[in-house]
Image (spheres, rainbow, N blue to C red):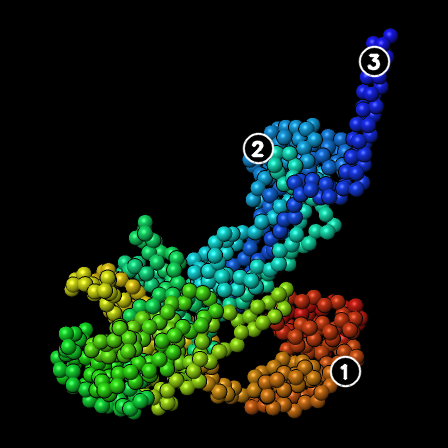
């Protein structure tokens, strides 16, 4: 009995314990569900959902005329939510075969049966995300949206994830200046400089994690659409860019050069119309590409093109005459341990300043500069600095090289620096900085900053324009500019640039040939590397463009600036000149070409009156709609008299329609009940009903035009 009582007690205790435990679980469930529910749901969602950025479409980059230089092409990852509630079993079974066939025909990667197997398996397994294809073009996506089931849009289970790929339609042309933008890589060129303008604002999209660790987008009413980037309109003219690039490439190949650049700039505005940078490929000696922007990022010793800066300084500071005599001897002189030589023996032992510049005499320039600046060489350095040669131009694109003009109180200055500096050594200047100086001379002393961008537009509306920025209003005295222009034009007409041989227009410019230092030395004769250049402006009478060409390390035995860089300059200048209306004067040169008033056909008085007013032809006629004809074709003015065409038609008599336009003949005849048939083009030459014949309404008439 006692044992039975103990067993019952234990049973009751166990039962009570189980009830309490169950109540505890129930209580905890209620707390989790109703009290802590929001917190736990948030934690669960954190593991199965996330907010992802939606990339905005990057803005386009255009040339000055609206040609597309860089754009973002959309590509899509295509997936199928085959078990979305909107796709019923009946809808799926009735369309799966045709859908599989169309997918196979569109993508050409799997057969219809293979696609059908994928669809059936996904439907059976309750799969909510079936990846169909990556990198699908926008055109193919639009085709895909017309397929069975997919044509229902989101209700049809079509899932798309967009990515954008940056493309340059013109490939290599101005490639380094335009730049490139890729994920994980710092953008360069205009792409880098205007990255925030072009990139737009990212959107937000809710993503859900499904089986297999795959994230899929969720249709969410709170989704934030991305805002596309603004468009950039550059100063580059793609047609001129094509000319510059191919002219440069041809010379690089011919001379087996290492690399080179060419820049074309508008004189008044500083707008860069073309900029080409080509480097020989490491693995292919006949292939060149745009891998580095030498034009703005590679300062070198410029050589003889720097002599313009020396002449500007000494003429402006001391009023040196172009006829001043300089003793050059046999074309060789020595400063301390440095011997300066001319590339060619001088014409005479004594040359004028102008002839020194025209023949690019190193000896003549060093003697001129040391004569005036040897007692105060810092004055010369300061003068060069006033030409903006010792600091960056502050370009809108990154990567500008740092120039250097040595100063007397630094380690770079020695006893031979002044003569060396005078003809382009011991200094570092980029090609664009050299061009900017020459452009200032062409622009009558007004130095403007080189520009690459005209304006920024958003949805076709201009949001910002870039105006011409003046760096130096007056570079030197007007008389100095006049003198150096005479010298620059003399280089091409009678000096080292004579081989350019441009007859259609005059050019002012300067050749340059510089030895390239390697490891601090210039190498032995026969092993030296050279840099050939030519820089100038055209047409000389009214400069519209400046251009510089620099060829580095030509290796076919020819290395002088006129012979290597000159042909590139010539080809660019001639093609720009021939294609630019700004370069060509009007054929009539302001004189009147008309010696007599032109002959006219019979027409309405008010119409001929409008023509006469527009062309300023003296005329005497009424402003009525009556028809008039010309009386004296050889007169210096229009003498017009009214015809009786309408009066004759009202009387039922066929008038002489000769000379009428087809429009006016139809107007007259159809208003009087004729059925008119026209043959040919022009004005009336012949009519089937003779003038003077009577007619009745409904008659047919054939008019022959010519």
Q: Confirm whether residue 304 shows in the render.
A: no
Provide the secondary structure element on which disc 2 rests: loop
Q: Residues within 10 Å of mark 2 (few under 14, many from 20)?
A: some
Image position of 56 (left or right of 437) = right
Earlier residue among tags 1 and 3: 3
Q: Tell me how far mark 2 sits from mark 1, CA to CA.
A: 81 Å
The residue at 20%/76% (across/down) is: 416
Depth check: give the residue in front, 38 or 598: 38
Provide the secondary structure element on which disc 1 rests: helix
Residue 194 position, x and y percent, is: 52, 64
Question: Which residue lies under the disc numbered 3?
Answer: 6
Identity of the residue furthest to the top in this view: 1
Earlier residue among tags 2 and 1: 2
Q: Are marks 2 and 1 in contact (CB under 8 Å)?
A: no
- Residue 415 in the image: above or below residue 79: below
Q: Residues within 10 Å of mark 3 (few under 14, many from 20)?
A: few
Earlier residue among tags 2 and 3: 3
Quadrant location of the N terminus in the rendered image: top right
Between circles 1 and 3, the one closer to the viewer is: 3
Residue 104 position, x and y percent, is: 60, 35
For residue 110, the mark is: 2
Q: Tell me how far mark 1 sits from mark 3, CA to CA.
A: 140 Å
Question: Which residue lies under the disc numbered 1?
Answer: 647
The residue at 42%/64% (across/down) is: 399
Depth check: give the residue in front, 176 or 585: 176
Image position of 701 (left or right of 271) = right
């Amino acid at each position: 009995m006692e044992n039975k009582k103990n067993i019952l007690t234990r049973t009751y205790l166990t039962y009570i314990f189980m009830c309490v435990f169950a109540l505890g679980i129930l209580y905890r469930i209620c707390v989790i569900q109703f009290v802590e529910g929001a917190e736990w749901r948030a934690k669960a969602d954190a593991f199965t959902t996330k907010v992802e950025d939606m990339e905005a479409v990057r803005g386009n980059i255009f040339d000055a005329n609206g040609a597309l230089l860089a754009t973002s092409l959309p590509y899509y990852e295509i997936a199928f939510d085959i078990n979305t509630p909107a796709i019923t079993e009946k809808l799926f079974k009735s369309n799966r075969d045709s859908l599989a066939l169309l997918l196979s025909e569109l993508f050409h990667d799997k057969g219809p049966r293979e696609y059908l197997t994928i669809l059936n398996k996904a439907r059976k397994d309750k799969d909510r995300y079936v990846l169909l294809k990556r990198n699908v073009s926008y055109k193919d996506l639009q085709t895909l949206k017309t397929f069975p089931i997919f044509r229902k849009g989101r209700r049809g289970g079509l899932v798309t994830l967009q990515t954008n790929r940056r493309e340059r339609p013109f490939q290599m042309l101005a490639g380094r200046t335009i730049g490139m933008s890729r994920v994980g890589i710092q953008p360069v060129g205009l792409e880098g400089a205007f990255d925030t303008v072009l990139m737009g604002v990212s959107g937000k999209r809710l993503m859900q994690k499904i089986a297999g660790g795959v994230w899929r987008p969720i249709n969410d009413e709170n989704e934030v659409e991305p805002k596309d980037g603004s468009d950039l309109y550059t100063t580059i003219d793609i047609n001129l860019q094509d000319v510059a690039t191919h002219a440069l490439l041809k010379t690089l190949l011919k001379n087996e050069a290492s690399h080179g650049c060419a820049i074309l700039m508008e004189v008044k505005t500083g707008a860069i119309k073309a900029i080409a940078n080509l480097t020989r490929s490491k693995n292919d000696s006949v292939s060149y590409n745009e891998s580095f922007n030498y034009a703005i990022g590679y300062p070198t010793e410029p050589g003889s093109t720097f002599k313009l800066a020396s002449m500007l300084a000494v003429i402006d500071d001391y009023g040196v005459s172009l006829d001043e005599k300089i003793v050059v001897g046999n074309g060789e002189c020595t400063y301390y341990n440095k011997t300066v030589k001319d590339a060619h023996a001088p014409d005479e032992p004594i040359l004028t300043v102008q002839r020194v510049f025209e023949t690019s005499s190193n000896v003549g320039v060093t003697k001129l500069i040391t004569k005036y600046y040897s007692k105060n060489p810092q004055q010369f350095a300061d003068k060069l600095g006033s030409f903006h040669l010792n600091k960056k131009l502050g370009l809108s694109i990154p990567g500008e090289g740092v120039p250097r003009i040595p100063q007397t109180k630094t380690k770079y200055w020695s006893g031979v620096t002044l003569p060396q500096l005078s003809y382009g050594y011991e200094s570092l200047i980029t090609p664009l900085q050299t061009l900017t100086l020459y452009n200032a001379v062409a622009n009558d002393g007004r130095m403007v900053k080189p520009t690459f961008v005209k304006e920024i537009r958003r949805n076709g509306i201009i949001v910002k324009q870039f105006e011409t920025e003046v760096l130096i209003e007056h570079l030197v005295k007007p008389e100095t500019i006049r003198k150096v222009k005479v010298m620059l034009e003399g280089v091409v007409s009678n000096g080292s640039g004579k081989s350019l041989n441009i007859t259609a227009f005059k050019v002012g410019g300067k050749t340059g040939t510089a030895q390239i230092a390697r490891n601090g030395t210039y190498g032995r004769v026969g092993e030296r590397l050279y840099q050939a250049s030519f820089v100038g402006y055209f047409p000389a009478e009214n400069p519209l463009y400046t251009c510089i060409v620099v060829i580095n390390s030509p290796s076919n035995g020819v290395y002088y600036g006129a012979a290597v860089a000159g042909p590139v300059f010539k080809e660019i200048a001639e093609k720009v000149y021939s294609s630019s209306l700004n370069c060509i004067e009007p054929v009539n040169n302001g004189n009147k070409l008309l010696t007599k008033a032109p002959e006219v056909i019979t027409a309405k008085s008010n119409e001929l009156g409008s023509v006469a007013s527009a062309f300023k032809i003296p005329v005497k006629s009424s402003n009525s709609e009556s028809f008039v004809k010309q009386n004296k074709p050889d007169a210096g003015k229009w003498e017009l008299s009214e015809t009786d065409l309408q009066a004759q038609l009202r009387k039922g008599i066929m008038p002489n329609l000769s000379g009428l336009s087809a429009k006016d003949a139809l107007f007259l005849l159809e208003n009087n009940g004729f059925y008119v048939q026209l043959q040919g083009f022009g004005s009336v030459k012949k009519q089937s009903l003779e003038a003077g014949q009577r007619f009745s309404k409904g008659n047919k008439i054939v008019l022959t035009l010519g």
